[in-house]
Amino acid sequence: MSGTESVAFDTPQRERRGDNFAMWVFIASEAMLFGAIFLVFLVAHIDFGRAFAGASKHLSLPLGTFNTVLLITSSFTMALAHMLALQRRWRATVWALLATSALGVCFLVVKGIEYGKEIQEGLAPLLGLPFRYSGPDPVHAEFFFGLYFAMTSLHALHLIGGIVVITGMIALWRTANPASRLGRVVAVGLYWHFVDIIWVFMFPVLYLINR
Amino acid sequence: MSTEALRPSSYLGEGAGPAAWLLTTDHKRVAWLYLVSLTAFFFLGGAFAVLMRVELATPAGDLVSDDTYNRLFSLHGIIMVWFFLVPSIPATLGNFLLPLMIGARDLAFPRLNLASWYVFILGSAFALASVLAGGVDTGWTFYTPLSTLYANGFVSMAALGVFIVGFSTIMTGINFIVTIHTLRAPGLTWFRLPIFVWTMYATALVMVLATPVLAASLILIVLERLFGIGIFNPALGGDPLLFQHLFWFYSHPAVYIMILPGMGVVSEVLPCFSRRPLFGYKAVALSSMAIAVFGFLVWGHHMFVSGQSAYAGVLFSFLSFCVAIPSAIKVFNWSLTLRKGEITFETPMLYALFFLALFTFGGLAGLFLAALAIDVHVHDTYFVVAHFHYIMVGGMVTAYMAGLHFWWPKLTGRMYSETWGRIAATVTFLGFNLTFFPQFVLGFLGMPRRYHTYPPEFQFWHILSSAGAVVLAVGYLMPLLYLGWSLFRGARAPANPWRATGLEWQTASPPPPHNFETMPVVTRPAYAYDMKGLKHERFSPHREEAAQ
């Protein structure tokens, strides 16, 4: 078929529209996944507001803020990659993509440091680790930390997925069909921005709402 | 043009080895992969049901222990819901027919389509492993805190299986939505689409938007069991009721995943065998969308006795009654389609008429359950079991059989035995009613579901139900034999044996690898059975007219 990946499409242009649309549908689906978990958090927050407020203060605001800056910067480099791909400046596109995934890796490293700190302080109620919490209402504070780990690790998994896809795309840059390069950059860009936006909601809900 | 001339280039002729099937990206072959695996799951889930019905023939627990019985109904539910009903019509008939019906060469993402089958198989490997390891005893609903704190079965493994199969569902959903939006043939506007395509669209939307919520709740269950994060555990500050909200936010829309495709099949079959255009086309098309939307707003009706706010109960009751409106619109339009039609009773039509009866009956029972006071009385009794089996089995499985027979000539290029088909359809209908009607009575008399023993006064109804289950099993085994036989010995099918109007009938039976020799152009509304020359005479596809 005339330069398309799928036999179903007549032209690469129509295929790109289809790819783009599929990515939006997938993002709608992902939004429901995170939506459910945000809902759990917000309902629990209404029920146990004081305990959650107390527990939230034990998270590291500097590290969380630094990570937010990292991810927003990565969205910028991803937008740059999209722009460069539109101008067919492929070398620069690859560099922008590399920068994006490097920033993603930095985010994960910082998140790992943060997790390590929380585990040391006894704030991680998982895998049978001791939970040591001195503030008021430790039972519901434990619930807060359970949700915190569930939400942030689910987000981190999505970020890892994004990094793997970008890395794979760069590794196969020369062998894959050049006609669909732009389509791939746009699709992975949409996904990356979505994962960033999830963090942009998670950060205030977990770190800021109670301060 | 004779159909014989087209046969050498059929999709079935493109390689016969395992690799040609297991690595195919042809939507028609992927449909077969699903068809074979789903049939296996249907009979596995059915076997669990038969064991349950045998146990229930006597009031005492003499065949299996209570624990084994818990595992039987849990596995029956898990397998039938996620490994048969949810993918049933979309992944088999939908996969095969959607591109044909809209005049496309394939689904938008053929490799994603094949990948979805492998993900399905991976998920089912987890589910089967949990069966072999000893099963699950939580019921298909995985309610917390039973599933997280007390259940001693292989809950995490089964939940992971369901979680993985969810991805396969989402992949299919995305593929269908993009295909319907971007690959319709020239002239095929939205309101010329067959209703089957509309219902596939509505189903795909629900798949894409509801399944992730199930994924979220199953992740949280697995996190709780494996990592000790107590989201649903009150001792750790969690809330068990939260699980029910999340679960039913998925599982009620999933009920519509399990019935909308059946409505689509029936909307194709009824006009064809009454030689009449579908009555109220637009109303039927849009009512599918209305069902998909309302489906997201009624989950609380599963929780009337869970202690949720009484005001929420009233609201959910009201919204549940609202779902009956689009469903009734469909039933009335189907009935009016039959009016003054030249009705013939071929096997697909028999199944479709049985669907109409059983779906209406089950739907009306649903209104009883949507009423708060009655629901408190019959909650968690056999009344509920009978209600959803009338919809899921009487409705969806009957429609699945209607569709399988209707499109069997297209799938295989062979005709099945009409006599055996009619006998099987009738046996199924009788067996079904004998199995499940007594369960309405049992439920109303107060027999709770999920018990393996019961007071002796219920035995009469239980024996009727168990006897019916045997008849029903025969009804389902018969097609396995005569359809299997027809695969090899059936008479060759012409391109359009039913003189139907859909685009899928305008190509050869079985279709060529990329579906159409000449890509079709659509100039007519769907179901143009009243057009001159179509009503009484053999339908001649316009592709042939153009060739002359």
Image (tube, rainbow, N blue to C red):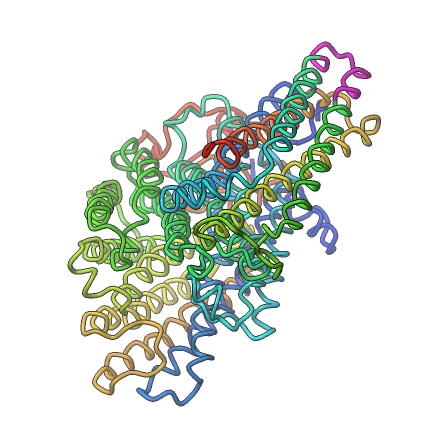
Q: Is residue B46 above or below residue B3?
A: below
Q: Nearer the viewer, residue B334 or B465?
A: B465
Identity of the residue furthest to the top in this view = A87
Q: Nearer the viewer, residue A19 or A95?
A: A95
Can residue B410 be seen in this snapshot? no
Q: Is residue B343 magenta?
A: no
Determine the residue positioned at 69% across, 26% down. A184
Q: Is residue A91 magenta?
A: yes
User: Which of the 4 quarters of the picture holds residue B405?
Assistant: bottom left
Q: Nearer the viewer, residue A75 or B5?
A: A75
Determine the residue positioned at 25% across, 40% down. B326
Q: How many marks?
A: 0
Tell me where the magenta segment starts and ends, as one range. Answer: A84-96
In-image side of A148 versus B419 (left or right): right
Question: Residue B477: percent from the left, percent from the top?
Answer: 46, 70
Q: Nearer the viewer, residue A185 or B344?
A: A185
In-image side of B183 versus B190 (left or right): right
Question: Residue B77: percent from the left, percent from the top?
Answer: 44, 64
Label the magenta part by its dominant secondary structure: helix
Can residue B473 be seen in this snapshot? yes
Determine the residue positioned at 77% across, 34% down. A168
User: Which of the 4 quarters of the picture holds residue B96?
Assistant: top right
User: Which of the 4 quarters of the picture holds residue B25?
Assistant: top right
The N terminus of chain A: image quadrant: top right
Question: Residue B421: percent from the left, percent from the top?
Answer: 41, 62
In-image side of B78 versus B369 (left or right): right
